[in-house]
Image (cartoon, helix red, strand yellow):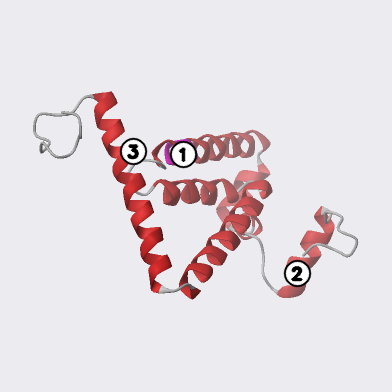
């Protein structure tokens, strides 16, 4: 979508790009809905709504970032928060597209690798998650119901 010369496209160029290829940005699709147009008609409600979306999306991203090293859906939570932010903010939509492009490239690359590389990536990931879990349990205190093999220094 970058024009020749490597310069960043202007807002009008981006809108023309979306109009040409038939795709609208998420923010534009939401803005075309009836309920969003009614909110946009009243400036105070529109500002409050955008602030609310920013706070909710920011909190979801923050929770996701905090849970990335822990077992669970850390990155998925970050992407969900970016999705919420992308409904109102163009920068979040660009970041979401950047993330989607790189996740797709990673999964395509990993899919082209031999099985031993995929197994090595899985083993390193599992070891990292286990290590983070053990360190987290050690720092926070191990509950009594936890089996004895989980922390290595019990």
How many numbered callouts?
Answer: 3
Residue under label 2, please give it.
19
- Mark 3–mark 1 CB contact (< 8 Å): no
**Residue range corresponding to the magenta coloring:** 61-65
Query: Was residue 42 drawn as part of the magenta stretch in this picture?
Result: no
Q: Name the residue: 87% across, 55% down.
A: 7
Q: Which residue is mark 3?
A: 132
Q: Nearer the viewer, mark 2 or mark 3?
A: 3
- In the picture of the structure, the residue carrying the numbered disc 1 is 65
The location of residue 94, given as percent across then percent down, is: 66, 53
Between 45 and 72, the one nearer to me in the picture: 72
**CA distance separating discs 1 and 2:** 34 Å
Predominant secondary structure, magenta span: helix
Residue appearing at x 63%, y 51% in the figure: 95
Q: Which mark is residue 46?
A: none
Which circle, 1 or 2, is nearer the viewer? 1
User: Which residue: 10% across, 38% down?
Assistant: 147
Find residue 122 and report its horizontal and vertical position in percent: 36, 59
How packed is label 1: few (under 14 Cα within 10 Å), some, or many (20 or more)? Answer: some
64, 21: nearer the viewer = 64
Q: How far apart in space, not on screen, are marks 2 and 3 (Cα)?
A: 47 Å
- Determine crowd level at label 2: few under 14, some 14-19, many 20+ residues with C-alpha closer than 10 A: few
Residue 64 position within the rendered picture, expressed as x and y whole percent measured from the top left:
43, 41
Q: Earlier in the sequence, mark 1 or mark 2?
A: 2
Taking 110 as reference, is 17 left or right?
right
- Image-based side of 148 in relation to 18, left or right: left
Relative to 1, residue 84 above or below: above
Q: Earlier in the sequence, mark 3 or mark 1?
A: 1
């Amino acid at each position: 979508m970058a024009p020749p010369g490597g310069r960043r496209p202007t807002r009008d160029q981006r809108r023309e790009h979306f109009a040409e290829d038939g795709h609208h940005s998420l923010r534009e699709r939401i803005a075309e809905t009836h309920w969003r147009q009614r909110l946009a008609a009243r400036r105070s409600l529109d500002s409050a709504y955008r602030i609310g979306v920013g706070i909710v999306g920011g909190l979801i991203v923050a929770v996701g970032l905090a849970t990335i090293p822990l077992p669970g859906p850390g990155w998925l939570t970050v992407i969900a928060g970016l999705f919420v932010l992308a409904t109102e903010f163009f920068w979040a939509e660009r970041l979401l597209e950047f993330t989607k492009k790189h996740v797709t490239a990673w999964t395509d690359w990993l899919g082209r690798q031999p099985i031993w590389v995929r197994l090595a990536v899985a083993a390193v990931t599992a070891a990292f998650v286990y290590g983070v879990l053990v360190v987290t349990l050690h720092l926070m205190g191990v509950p009594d119901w936890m089996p004895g093999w989980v922390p290595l220094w019990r």
